[in-house]
């Protein structure tokens, strides 16, 4: 059985991305990562999955476990990322506005 872990951080949009953002921009991100139920937050796995999603220089600073019932109260974008994580292993949300490298997210 799986659960979805959620990680907050920032990353640089890679050259070969399908996100629609200019390569090289730094953005706040949220990574939804499917893991076995009861596992500790796997920051390395979430980072790898964000890179697989077209991001670079990924720094994740917080992690948590998403309760399925909480998804109903979230935006459609979050719900979609949650479903992608359950179905395909991960989902990534990249916030539209670029941030400064030293800016907290």
Image: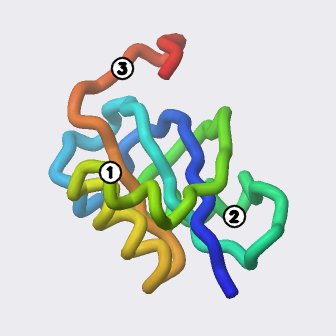
Q: Compare marks 1 and 3 and give the one earlier in the sequence.
A: 1
Residue depicted at x 46% and y 63%: 69
Instruction: Check whether the beta carbons of the residues at disc 3 and disc 2 lie within 8 A of each other.
Output: no
Residue depicted at x 48% and y 79%: 86
Relative side of 33 to 43, left or right: left
Q: Which residue is mark 2?
A: 45
Residue depicted at x 65% and y 80%: 2
| Outermost residue to the left | 20
Q: Which residue is mark 3?
A: 99
Q: Which residue is mark 1?
A: 73
**Alpha carbon of mark 2 to alpha carbon of mark 1: how far?**
27 Å
- Mark 3 Cα within 10 Å, few/some/many (few <14, many 20+)? some
- Mark 1 Cα within 10 Å, few/some/many (few <14, many 20+)? few
- Nearest to the observer: residue 93 or residue 3: 3
Q: Quadrant of residue 37?
A: bottom right
Relative side of 45 to 4, left or right: right
x, y percent for residue 62? 66, 36
| Residue 8: mark in rendering | none
- Nearest to the observer: residue 18 or residue 95: 95
**Alpha carbon of mark 1 to alpha carbon of mark 3: how far?**
27 Å
- Nearest to the observer: residue 64 or residue 98: 64
**Alpha carbon of mark 3 to alpha carbon of mark 2: how far?**
24 Å
x, y percent for residue 55? 44, 51
Assign the N terminus to one quadrant of the image.
bottom right
User: Between tags 1 and 3, which lies in front?
Assistant: 1
Relative side of 75 to 36, left or right: left
Residue depicted at x 49% and y 34%: 10
């Amino acid at each position: 059985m799986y659960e979805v872990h959620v990680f907050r951080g920032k990353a640089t949009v890679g050259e070969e991305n399908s996100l629609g953002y200019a390569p090289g921009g730094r953005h706040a991100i949220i990574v939804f990562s499917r893991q076995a139920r009861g596992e500790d937050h796997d920051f390395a796995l979430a980072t790898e999955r964000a890179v697989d999603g077209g991001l670079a220089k990924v720094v994740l600073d917080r992690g948590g476990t998403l309760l399925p019932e909480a998804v109903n109260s979230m935006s459609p974008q979050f719900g979609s990322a949650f479903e992608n994580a359950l179905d395909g292993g991960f989902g990534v949300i990249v916030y539209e506005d670029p941030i400064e490298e030293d800016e907290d997210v």
